[in-house]
Image (spheres, rainbow, N blue to C red):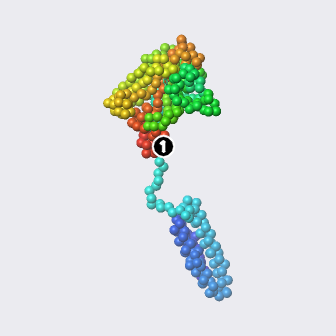
Amino acid sequence: MEDRLKNIEVELQNFVSDTKDSLEAFRLRFISKKGQIAQLFEEFKQMSGEEKKKVGKALNELKRSAESKFKELQEQLDSQGYGSNVDIDLSLPPVTDAIGNLHPLNLTRYKIIQIFERLGFNVSDGPEIEDDWHNFSALNFPDNHPAREMQDTFFIEKNPDMLLRTHTSNVQIRLMQKQKPPIRSIMPGRVYRNEAISARAHCFFHQVEGLYVDKNVSFADLKQTLYHFAKEMYGKDIKIRFRPSFFPFTEPSAEIDISCLICQGDGCAVCKHSGWVEIAGSGMVHPNVLKNCGIDPEEYTGFAFGMGIERVTQLRYRVNDLRLYSENDIRFLKQFKPVI
Ligand code: DAH
């Protein structure tokens, strides 16, 4: 009996268990009512008093030793995360971490920034919750002027002077107020308009404003800068045209169209069968705007432009519905590989 006790002790101490199944095998073999130690206790009952004295203590010790070993193995298993209720199939292929990619609007924003940085523009930022003066009045929109209706606005009820900015042009004002020319900056950001959501319009979208103020800045500089931008963004075969337009904050003003990349100019729904798509508004900064910011219009001139990032992205990647940008659908988002 004593030899058997020793052998079982060695066997259970050397037992290696790293699965739920082998732990159960340990329990059955040593601890259960039909296990080896229970068997020894059965035999113990039959022994004479003399024999019992010899092995009683060792037998109890073996029982305790088996129980503590079982506990130890169980804790080991739990700490490995294979808790008793979890079955892990180690033969399955691993689940790898998915590597995300940048949102198409960010890819385009970074590309726009890169193009203008090479021309010596820096990047500025401004608030999305803005006061009336920076969003409208300073930009030469008189109070109650119908030009304000071009941009259907979210006003804040508690304070009618505050609104969600309708364009990034507020940042022009903030920049000119705090910095004297020369100023050469682009200003990307989110803007808001009270529009019904459809494939072509949303209650928020993104713009990049551009501003260049210095001595002798002319309309020719504006044209060359934006022509260069279009070629860098869409390739050297792109066509660009300036269409006379009206903005209160520029004089003269122009809309900038590029040849439609969806139909190559043949006419389609995106270009409304004209072969041209509008990507930006632009013009020479109105003297009143310079004055409002403390810059002398006799000394300085400037050009400005504002383009829609959604529109630029639509033509870049042929996206036909604006809503896709904010639906967060992974099937859409995972298609965009950086082309910076
Ligand atoms: N702020 C205009 C808009 O949202 C776009 C724009 C036009 C910006 C002409 C400019 C500009 O800076 O010069 O419709």
Question: 26 or 256: nearer the eye?
Answer: 256
Q: Position of residue 321 (x, y in %)?
A: 42, 38
- Residue 304, above or below 129: above
Dot 1 alpha-carbon crowd within 10 angstroms: few under 14, some 14 to 19, many 20 or more: few
At 60% from the left and 66% from the top, the residue drawn is 72
Residue 7 visible in the current orientation: no
Image check: 141 left or right of 272? right
Q: How many marks?
A: 1
What amino acid type is highlighted by mark number 1? Asn
Image check: 231 left or right of 147? left
At 44% from the left and 37% from the top, the residue drawn is 199
| Residue found at the very far top of the displayed protein | 298
Quarter of the C terminus within the rendering: top left
Residue highlighted by disc 1: 328
At 46% from the left and 39% from the top, the residue drawn is 323
Question: 47 or 73: nearer the eye?
Answer: 73
Image check: 260 left or right of 56? left
Question: 119 or 38: nearer the eye?
Answer: 119
At 43% from the left and 17% from the top, the residue drawn is 220
Quarter of the N terminus within the rendering: bottom right
Tag 1, which secondary structure?
A: loop
Quadrant in the picture for residue 233: top left
Q: Position of residue 252 (x, y in %)?
A: 46, 17
Question: 89 or 287: nearer the eye?
Answer: 287
Q: Position of residue 281 (x, y in %)?
A: 46, 24
Quadrant in the picture for residue 9: bottom right
- Residue 40, above or below 298: below
Residue 145 visible in the current orientation: yes
Q: Position of residue 329 (x, y in %)?
A: 46, 44
